[in-house]
Image (cartoon, rainbow, N blue to C red):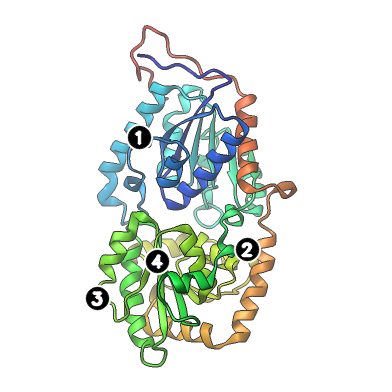
Amino acid sequence: MVVTASSPSAPLIWILAGEASGDVLGARLMQALLARNPAIRFAGVGGVRMQEQGLHSLFPMRDLAVMGLVEILPRLRALSARLNEAVQDIEARRPDLVVTIDSPGFALRLLRRIAGLGIPRVHYVAPQVWAWRQKRVKEFPGLWEELLCLLPFEEEFFSRHGLLTKFVGHPVLQSGAQDGNAARFYQTHGLKEGARVLILMPGSRRSEAPRLLPVFGKMLALLQRDMPDVVPVIPVSPVVAATVARETARWPVRPVIVTEIQDKHDAFAAAGAALTKSGTSTLELALAGVPMAVTYRVNPLTAFMARRLIRVPHVAMVNLLAGRAIVPELLQEQCQPAVLAGAVRDLFENPEMAAGQKAAFRTVLEGLRGPGGMLPADAAAEAVLHLLANTAPAAQVPQSAPAGAEKAG
């Protein structure tokens, strides 16, 4: 059976997310779209959150959750096969619109492959070329009809290069990270109220966590000498929960591993300090008011190449948005047990440092509100529906042609 473009009253949106953060973003977007048009149908690739909104994922999202210049090499053949599968599904279904979310390594290749189909395309979360390899922006014209960005300075950056871009606000403001209940967390996990809770966030990808967890374990061994009451808590996505449990089985202190959103936010409310990878997790912690240090470790070759390409003064998102170092960045060679242990002690025992971070967090977060005070997911949904309403429908596949017969240009 040949599937043709949907009717205006029941549009089909093909949507893709490649990692846990994109899955959350996609779910909120789907929910906002359905609130405006309950007849909208979805196809594509996503995780648990998007599936809760009605998506039947073409293949497991975890197949795409990989990062790093070196780490991706062993996965190239499998990723290429998944790319072909996604292209063929779009060719067969002929959706009214395609939305790709973050994961630029996969998403931008997909957008390029389907360029000849005449289907309007939206990319949600701007590629961070303003941070490194800025010349890559010249490759983007023709990849999408509209780019939805999360950071206020991105709209001007991409518009300057002739790309239709809209700032919709940062989704961390909808995360609920500030609404946790500390007492509930202590009770749920049988902890003594007032215990020193330390949040450890090693990353949401299977390729990230194994690099940071061994260092975190050795750091905890050092902390036990003078801070034996520290309780490590690791919020992780279900994608990496088994990996984290395996990697931490021999730690000197067994961590509390949480996978539920509410439990994570309760942990934030109970926490006195955090060690986190760079990225959106810093904004979640900032929203919850948790003092933090940022740390990260990748393959040495990846780090060497990245340092030659990075064009921004800070790696941590909160520092980048603040324009100054409000939280410590302990990266690569500084990602060592003794260094991290010292940073944790400072966070717990220096109230002036903690208060200074929290004050700076509030200023940073104020700048992430969407246009007109609209919630980010609502602003994104409005942009998607506007494009859908103002773009001619994709050319239909002739009834005599076999499904998937048209190839992307």
Tag 4 or tag 3, which sits nearer the N-term? 4
Q: Which residue is mark 2?
A: 321
From where the camera sits, is residue 400 visible?
Answer: yes
Residue 28 higher or lower than 304, as above or below: above
Report the mark closest to the observer, 4 or 2: 4
Q: Residues within 10 Å of mark 3 (few under 14, many from 20)?
A: few
At which x and y percent is residue 177?
56, 62
Q: Considering depth in this image, is 16 or 80 the residue closer to the camera?
A: 16
Quarter occupied by residue 146: top right
Q: Residue 104: give its label.
A: none
Q: Residue at x 65, y 36 (%)?
A: 382
Indicate the quadrant containing the C terminus: top left, top right, bottom left or bottom right. Answer: top left
Tag 1 or tag 4, which sits nearer the N-term? 1
The amino acid type of the residue labelled 4 equals: Pro
Q: Which residue is mark 1?
A: 58
Left or right of residue 195: residue 179: right
Instruction: Find numbered disc 2 in the image and state the secondary structure of the residue it sits on.
Output: helix
Marks 2/3: CA–CA distance: 38 Å
At which x and y percent is residue 45?
40, 38
Q: Which residue is mark 3?
A: 250
Q: Residues within 10 Å of mark 1 (few under 14, many from 20)?
A: some
Tag 3 or tag 1, which sits nearer the N-term? 1
Q: Answer whether labels 4 and 2 touch (C-beta < 8 Å).
A: no
Marks 1/2: CA–CA distance: 36 Å
Q: Residues within 10 Å of mark 2 (few under 14, many from 20)?
A: some
Q: Which residue is mark 4?
A: 202
